[in-house]
Image (tube, helix red, strand yellow):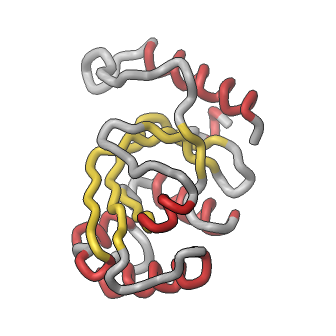
Amino acid sequence: MTAENIARFWADVRSTLLSRPVGGGAITLELPEEPPEAWAFGATPEHADGLLALVLEGTKTGTASSLADCDAEGESIPAIGDLSIILDGAEAPRAVLEVTAIDVLSFEDVTEEHAHAEGEHDRTLASWRSIHESFWREHSAQGFAPDMLVACERFRVIFPVTDARR
């Protein structure tokens, strides 16, 4: 994905969202001229596509990030109101998300509610722990520890790319 493609996508998002009423009234989002960060879920194109599908169907409304990985990569912890462009496995923009809540917890303190919001497998905390421990052991340069800090993010989709818009 080139910066030019992201800029073109963001211009389309701004044009679309700022020119139509949302929820019975004018949109209340601040949409900066510069595109927000663009990223994909997971560590592989398959992860990106599978998790994006859960987002677009409304099942996935949360995600989690290792704070150690964020620090190591120079990334800031998301804040309420932050926007992100979500890419598919081919690095094409497919959605814009807005952060609605953020909690920093140890891995062992992540809640059943958050696990359910992540929308993966059977949506239980046991499943969430298994999936995320395995993910961080395999894909994190910082590794996994039961007491590691995790940013638990909740979000809403403000702009999905439908097949008609692709």
Query: Image height check: is 19 above or below 117?
Result: above
Is the N terminus in the top left, top right, bottom left or bottom right quadrant?
Answer: top right
Front residue of 72/157: it is 72
Question: In the image, what residue occupies the spot 23% across and 73% down?
Answer: 111
Q: Where is residue 9 in the image (x, y as percent from the top left)?
A: 64, 29
Residue 62 image point, x, y percent? 36, 59
| Vertical arrangement, residue 104 with respect to residue 112, above or below | above
Q: In which quarter of the image is residue 17?
A: top left
Q: Which residue is drawn at 52% across and 85% down?
A: 134
Closer to us: 33 or 112: 33
Where does the image place residue 71, in percent across and percent down from the top left? 48, 59
Residue 124 in picture, x, y percent from top left: 31, 80
Q: Quadrant of the C terminus?
A: top right
Residue located at (60% from left, 20% from top): 11
The number of callouts visible is 0
Q: Is residue 166 above or below residue 114?
A: above
Report the front residue among 53 and 136.
136
Depth check: give the residue in front, 11 or 106.
Answer: 106
| Residue beneath the point at 40% across and 64% down | 64
